[in-house]
Structure formats: C-alpha cells, structure tokens
Image: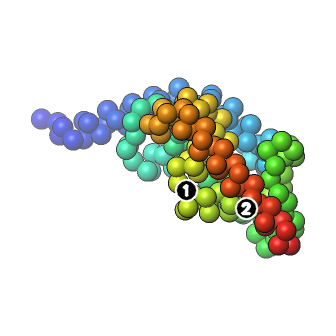
Amino acid sequence: MPDASKSGTRNRRDAFDQVIRELHPELRRFVRSQFLRCDVSATLSATCVVHEIYIRLRNRGYDWRGKSHIRALAIKSAEQVLIDYARRRSSQKRGGLLRRVTFDERSAPAQPSPAVSLDLHAALQQLRSKRPKQWEVVNLRYMGGLSFKEIAKVMNIAPDTAREYWAYAKAWLSCRLSSVERSR
C-alpha cells in the first residue's frame, strides 16, 4: 500500500510544477523587464534566472496557497537572484561601489548601475525590518508589477490598504535615499 504522505507530497509537487509551467512565460517577461532596470542582460539570461527561481522555490518546500502565492514567491525570489548577481558584480575585485545615486521613480535611468540597485536594496531591507507590510507591497508592486487588487489578494488586505502602504513606503524610501545621498 502506498504511503499517503508521500502521495500527498507528490501531488503538491506536481501541482507546483504545473503552476510554474503556466507562469514560466510570465516570469521570463518579468525578468526581462527587470533587466531594463539593471544592466545585466548582456551577462545573464532570463531563462537562467527563471530556472534559479524554480530551484529556490522547489528547495523552499511546498508551503503555498495557490497560483497567486507562488507568483508572489517567485517575484521575491527573482529580486533576490538579481540582487545576488548585482552584489557579485559590485564586489571589490570588480571595482567596488563606484557611485551612489538617489532613486526617483519618475526619473530613474533605464539601466542603473549595480551600485544604485544595492542602495535601493539596502533601503528596502531597512524598510523590511521596520515596516514589513509596506515592504511587501513595494516588493510586489515595484519588482512584481502587481496591481493593488492583486497585492490585496496575495496579502489578504483591502486594495485601499495596499495603496496606503505603497504611499507610505514611497515617502519613506525617498527620505532614506535622499539622506544617503546627502551623507556623501
């Protein structure tokens, strides 16, 4: 007689793999759009990033609540893959962090340097530790391109609450990034 727990795990793994197959084209588009924000497209392929996302999610286990949740986890994982890549590119043996600039949503360059990505990442990590819900909204909206309605569904909050968290986070990040620039 087959072990029920192994069968349940296999079914969840198969369901996970099916959702990832469905999301694969969307994730590739998402990763390519992120390449426009950071200068990595010449040395990193969207397919490699999507495969890395799959591996990270699969190794994480199957604690997910449907396609929207897997999509949100994939977006977070993509951010981490790209940040890890930016860190490797910015290491001291490659010239270090040569310059830092303030992130401004309206005037952000199409391809910021890895240093800009790392400044933004550092500010986002501070936001994450101080205001995790606001950080999650920024992550899902900025990195994932989700609408407020989609964010609300993933986070189990009202769309208006997601908008409020977004407004707070934008103001907080703007203040934090401008103080980094002033300190130089």
Name the amino acid, label 1: Arg
Q: Is residue 109 above or below residue 25?
A: below
Residue closest to the far top: 22
Q: Residue at left 83%, top 65%?
A: 181
State whether residue 98 appears in this view.
Answer: yes
Q: Is residue 175 left or right of residue 47?
A: right
Where is residue 16? Give x, y as percent.
42, 34
Is the Cβ of the residue at disc 1 closer than 8 Å to that at disc 2?
Answer: no
Name the amino acid, label 2: Arg
Q: Is residue 175 above or below residue 59?
A: below
Where is residue 114? Give x, y as percent.
79, 58
Q: Which residue is mark 1?
A: 131
Q: Residue at left 32%, top 32%?
A: 11
Q: Is residue 24 above or below residue 78?
A: above
Where residue 175 sits, quadrant-wise, is bottom right
User: Looking at the image, which is closer to me, 122 or 79?
Assistant: 122
Q: Which residue is mark 2?
A: 176
Q: Along the polypeptide, which appears first: circle 1 or circle 2?
A: 1
Pointer 2 local density, CA inside 10 Å: few below 14, some 14–19, many at least 20: many
Pointer 1 local density, CA inside 10 Å: few below 14, some 14–19, many at least 20: some
Q: Residue at left 82%, top 72%?
A: 183
The scheme the figure's colours follow is rainbow
